Image (tube, rainbow, N blue to C red):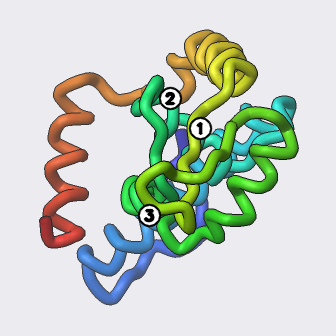
Amino acid sequence: MPSFENEIKQSNFASEQLKAHLNVLFTANFLYNKITAYLKPFNLTHEQYNVLRILRGSHPNSMCQKDILSRMVSPSSNLTLIINKLLNKKWVMVEKAERDRREYVINISPAGLELLSQIDGVLKEVEDQLFTLSVSESFHLNALLDKLRGS
């Protein structure tokens, strides 16, 4: 795989830290585009996929919107719009909450679970293309990324 410098055709940076930050942004975009290609045949966006995975993680329990939003990779997303699109595709179920009739609870539908199962199968087939780091390298990268965010 070509180096970051070759990819963006630049070899001089103000600092190694700036280069690392740009490399993280460039790599995030690279991964985003790669996953977009895998989700496209399912007519699913990253944000919709993220919501479905969150709901599957809490299944069979329902979740309210604020709890889903707090777990999203991109919490600035328009969750109401995402939920409506998933509802129209019959991948989620939405009901009024019993404790507060102004609040809604969301659950993944059987069709949503089946969709995620299909996507899991596709991602399993291309795992070697997606997961090019070893377990140890992934552990260290996760620690560095946590440090970068100030965690």
Report, in whole angstroms, how far the alpha carbon at label 3 lies from the one at label 1. Answer: 15 Å
Tell me which residue sits at (55%, 61%) in the image: 101
Give percent across and percent down for residue 148.
21, 68
**Residue type of the residue flagged with mark 1:** Leu
The reply to whether callout 2 and callout 1 are in contact (CB within 8 Å) is yes
Report which residue position mark 2 lands on.
Answer: 56
Report which residue position mark 1 lands on.
Answer: 52
Q: Quick one: label 3 or label 1, which is nearer the N terminus? A: 1
Question: Looking at the image, which is closer to me, 12 or 137?
Answer: 137
Report, in whole angstroms, how far the alpha carbon at label 2 lies from the one at label 1. Answer: 6 Å
**Residue type of the residue flagged with mark 3:** Lys
Which secondary structure lies at badge 1? Answer: helix
Number of the front mark, 3 or 1? 3
Residue 89 against residue 105 in the figure, above or below: above
Which secondary structure lies at badge 2? Answer: helix
**Quarter-wise, where is residue 17 in the image?**
bottom left
Q: Is residue 17 left or right of residue 46?
A: left
The disc placed on residue 66 is 3
